[in-house]
Image: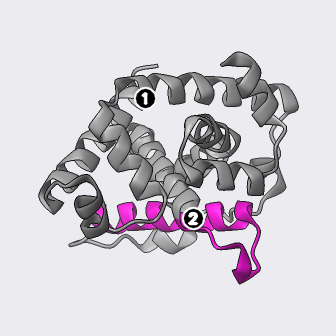
Amino acid sequence: MASADAGQVSLSDRELLSRARAGGADSEEALGILCARYFPLCRRLARQYAPSPADADDFVQEGTLGLIEAVRRYDESRGSSFESYVRRCVSSKLLSALEAMHTFKRRANVGCLPLENQPELLSPAPETRMIEQEDFRRRSRQILSLLSRSEHEVLRLYLRGQSYAQIAVQLDISQKSVDNALGRVRRKLRSALRNP
């Protein structure tokens, strides 16, 4: 697995996206590498959007869900780079989390969040980036090892862009079972991210 992982690390986003969506033996590793590649960006954006340090872990989790959504929905034909799309999906997820926190009471400073294109926030030192990527690869493997076979299959189909109804038909289960499986995946993801 280490040699396959090392071989895939050098692949482009486009190649990794193709492998992550195709299913099969390489899809988990490709997804893990993509997530590791963009997890530092998720973490930086989450820290920007989190209203307090106590909320940072929850916002990192929301950002990671945005990253997974970006892998699932990215369409190269629309002209934007995958990195731009990740930034948009993660930011959108984080803004939704902020809005949910402040449904009844909007704060005046929501619109005053730091700009995401500040170079010091987007260009960490190479050694910091490598450490963050290795940390995320380790966490990705940990998360995948926590999933049951059915949870893994539901997540795989979901990442390939299938709706709850399509997944339910393909796996011969109810849509509620699909929803429950994805809920368990999210809880396991949250737990793995909080407990390094």
Residue extending furthest toward the bottom:
78
Disc 1 is placed on an element classified as: helix
Could you say which is closer to the camera, residue 25 or residue 95? 25
Q: Which residues are magenta?
A: 73-102
Could you say which is closer to the camera, residue 107 or residue 58? 58
Q: Which quadrant of the rendered structure holds the N terminus? A: top right
Q: Is residue 172 left or right of residue 19?
A: left
Q: Is residue 141 visible?
A: yes
Residue tagged 2 = 113
Could you say which is closer to the camera, residue 115 or residue 192? 192
What crowding class fits label 2: few (fewer than 14 Cα within 10 Å), some (14-19), or many (20 or more)?
few
Pointers 2 and 1 in contact (CB under 8 A)?
Answer: no
Residue tagged 1 = 143
Sequence-first disc among 2 and 1: 2
Q: Amino acid at mark 2?
A: Leu
Q: Is residue 29 left or right of residue 172?
A: right
Residue 90 in picture, x, y percent from top left? 54, 59
**Residue 187 sits in quarter:** top left
Q: Cα distance, mark 2 to mark 1?
A: 31 Å
Residue 117 in picture, x, y percent from top left? 76, 63
Q: Amino acid at mark 1?
A: Ile
Residue at left offset 45%, top offset 41%: 56
What crowding class fits label 1: few (fewer than 14 Cα within 10 Å), some (14-19), or many (20 or more)?
some
Q: Which of the numbered marks, if any, corresponds to residue 122?
A: none
**Residue 134 sits in quarter:** top right
Please tell me whether residue 117 belongs to the stretch shown in magenta.
no
Compared to 182, does 105 lie above or below? Answer: below
Q: Main secondary structure of the magenta part?
A: helix
Residue at left offset 76%, top offset 35%: 8
